Amino acid sequence: MKILEVLTYYRPWVSGLTIYVERLSRALAKQGHDVTVLTSQYDPALPRYDVMDGVKIVRIPVALRVSKGVLMPDFGPMAWRLARAADVLHLHLPQFDAPGLATRGRLLGKPVVLTYHCDLQLPQGGFNRLVDRVVRLQNDTAGRLADAVVTYTRDYATHSPYLSQYIDRKLVIIPPPIDLDEAGEAVVRAFAAQHHLGERPIIGISARLAAEKGVEVLLRALPRVLERFPDALVLHAGPYKDIIGEEAYAARLAPLFEQYAGHYRLLGTLNGAELTAFYRNLDVLCICSLNSTESFGLVQIEAMRNGVPVAACALPGVRQPVTMTGMGEVTAVGDAEALAEALIRILSDTAHYRRPAETIADSFSPAQTAAEYARLFQALLRGERLGPTAEPPAYERLRALRAEPMTAEETR
């Protein structure tokens, strides 16, 4: 199949959405499909045309930027050209250009699939309210034109005003693709030595420094954690400098980072084996996002497949990995005290929360995700109609883990 993937930002931009599409595209290409990514040239230094891991990338120059949104005059003509050559159009929302792509699919008789990654929530203000209305209209139009709408969990779909309208028709649940490079014991030990971790309890957070990630909740929880574990250390993996649209947020948190300099380290972006070594040195991972721009939290699966339990906020979708597996604690959104108590419970008995990593890894392998998308694409190409939404078998396997904690021998 010739598959056209369309999204506003793609790698090397770092976000859950870009990582998702990169993993999916590579897996589809490995399975023999012809995959092209149409995206923005958000950084003029990036090449207009590129090939990475068998995936063709077409980047359109940005003429104007409004916060994280981009305007690309050359996008339309290129979209027509690539849509004509494709068998299937796969769009990733939120995305301003989605209705135009969906319309092209309809006119060309090509199946259109939307993957809805999260709701868009902009800061307060008259202009942002206008942008929000426009984006909602764009998303609604694209959804009506699409043949299928994909999301990660039924939990998130039920609570999303956008997705809930499709639950009884054309909504498909597909687990997200999670993959990590291998890291041998020498790499894991070298990471610990580099960051002078010693025997300290290590709390991890893996997220770019953005307002919706709720980093301040963890910072407010830290004093209570330090009462119980005085030498605890937070390792924060993810970009934290010059993030578009987050300059004011970074400035607001700067005094807190300075206050807890001995207990909070910003590591920047980690990749490959170094990222795996980061997870393997953690005792617990924290997800403290504040709103529905977070729909799942891919990083918690990355942690779980390395034996690390998670303290996750109770946002729809985000709470599902812990709820399904029992591998951690779920706390109220924005509640620093509850987060602190959850972290203390997990750090006090991490073995109680561990589950078999192999089952978790298999349930979210990029190859499996790609295979499920390929089946969906092929069904639409055959003209099949989608029935009521059902959760995938992988989630049933994960729920079985909740009743089967690892034995003391298995945790060693």
Image: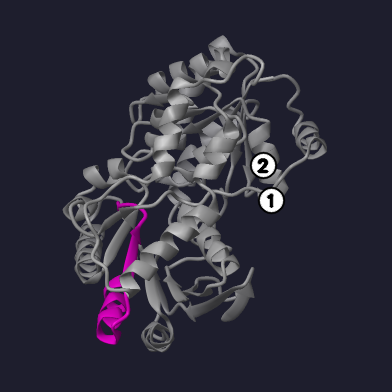
- Disc 2 secondary structure class: helix
On screen, residue 385 versus residue 334, left or right, reads left
Q: Which residue is mark 2?
A: 276
Residue at 44%, 36% (x, y): give it. Answer: 397
Q: Position of residue 129 (x, y in %)?
A: 21, 58
User: Would you place residue 227 above or below residue 5 in this image?
Assistant: above
- Disc 1 secondary structure class: helix
Q: Position of residue 175 (x, y in %)?
A: 42, 48
Residue at 30%, 52% (x, y): give it. Answer: 119
> Quadrant of the rendered structure where residue 65 is?
bottom left
Residue at 55%, 76% (x, y): give it. Answer: 57
Work out whether residue 178 or residue 268 is closer to the camera in this orientation and state it. Answer: 178
Say if residue 407 shows up in the picture. yes
Q: Position of residue 347 (x, y in %)?
A: 56, 17
Between marks 1 and 2, how big is the CA–CA gap? 7 Å
Residues marked 1 and 2 touching at CB (< 8 Å): yes
Residue kind at label 1, given as amino acid type: Gly
Q: Which mark is drawn over residue 351?
A: none
> Quadrant of the rendered structure where residue 192 is?
top right
Work out whether residue 245 or residue 192 is closer to the camera in this orientation and state it. Answer: 192
Q: Which residue is mark 1?
A: 272
Residue kind at label 2, given as amino acid type: Thr
Q: Position of residue 152 (x, y in %)?
A: 37, 49
Quarter the C terminus occupies: top right
User: Would you place residue 314 above or below residue 351 in this image?
Assistant: below
On screen, residue 125 versus residue 320, left or right, reads left
Please state the extent of the stretch shown in magenta in the rendering. Answer: 98-121
Crowding around mark 2 (Cα neighbors within 10 Å: few <14, some 14 to 19, many 20+) is many
User: Would you place residue 326 above or below residue 140 in this image?
Assistant: above
